[in-house]
Image: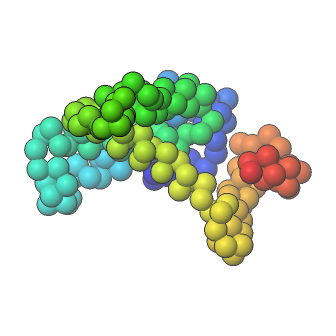
């Protein structure tokens, strides 16, 4: 989900008024760009067999693209608008009164295709969001590995003038805040 990541936050891309920020209307810039890069690759002739195996019909391809977009945008945890939309979809999919929840006789109504897709999509959105930050829950050496990489990325951005603060001045507090 981070293909061709620019190495700085979406907020920084907006502050710099980059071409990518403009292209994606200052919303989930890195995530949308990642989808476009990955989708272009999947749509290339080199991946025709894979694409046709995953999505044998145009309808399947359209549904798969929407799923890719949704789960990739779910990794933008800093956008309150997207969080609100995800929470709304979760509530719609799993709230009481939904036809897929238990009725008063403790029986389940069958799911419609639309309900099943909504539930599957929102669950996958939450799973990819969790996996995006799961290194924090892994063994210490995994946590260190990914944090060192992020720290190096932020340090490079700072040295190039693309990050206002030196990460060494806020890293500890930021990590505690992240948890």
Q: Residue at x 74, y 48 (%)?
A: 178
Where residue 68 sits, quadrant-wise, is top left
In the visual, does 23 lie left or right of 46? right
Looking at the image, residue 21 lies above or below residue 129: above
- Inspect this view and state whether residue 24 appears: no
Residue furthest to the bottom in view is 141
Which residue lies at the image location 39% right of the left edge and 32% below the top edge?
93
When the figure is inspected, residue 152 is found, relative to residue 10, above or below; the finding is: below
| The quarter of the displayed image where residue 140 is located | bottom right
| Image colouring | rainbow
Query: Can you give x and y, in whole percent of width and height, for residue 76 in the image?
Result: 55, 39
Residue located at (64% from left, 41% from top) = 9
Residue located farthest toward the right when viewing the structure as drawn: 169
Give x and y (percent) for residue 165.
Answer: 83, 44
Residue 116 x, y percent position in the rendering: 28, 39
Foreground pick, 143 / 31: 143
Q: Is residue 114 visible?
A: yes
Q: Please give left or right for residue 99 compared with residue 80 in the image.
A: left
Q: Residue furthest front?
A: 105
- Residue sitting at x 35%, y 43%: 120
Residue 52: x percent and y percent? 13, 54
Q: How many marks?
A: 0
Q: Image check: 85 left or right of 118?
A: right
Q: Quadrant of residue 123?
A: top left
């Amino acid at each position: 989900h981070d293909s061709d990541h620019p190495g700085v936050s979406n907020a920084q891309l907006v502050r710099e008024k980059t071409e990518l920020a403009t292209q994606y209307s200052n919303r989930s810039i890195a995530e949308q760009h990642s989808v476009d890069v990955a989708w272009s690759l999947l749509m290339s002739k080199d991946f025709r067999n894979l694409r046709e195996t995953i999505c044998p019909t145009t309808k399947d391809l359209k549904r798969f693209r929407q799923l890719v977009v949704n789960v990739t945008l779910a990794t933008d945890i800093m956008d309150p608008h997207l969080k609100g939309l995800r929470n709304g979809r979760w509530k719609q999919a799993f709230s009481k009164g939904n036809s897929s929840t238990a009725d008063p006789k403790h029986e389940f109504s069958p799911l419609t295709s639309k309900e099943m897709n909504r539930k599957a999509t929102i669950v996958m959105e939450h799973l990819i969001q969790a996996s995006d930050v799961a290194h924090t829950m892994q063994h210490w050496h995994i946590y260190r590995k990914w944090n060192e990489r992020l720290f190096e990325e932020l340090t490079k951005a700072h040295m190039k003038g693309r990050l206002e603060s030196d990460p060494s001045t806020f890293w500890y507090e930021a990590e505690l805040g992240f948890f």
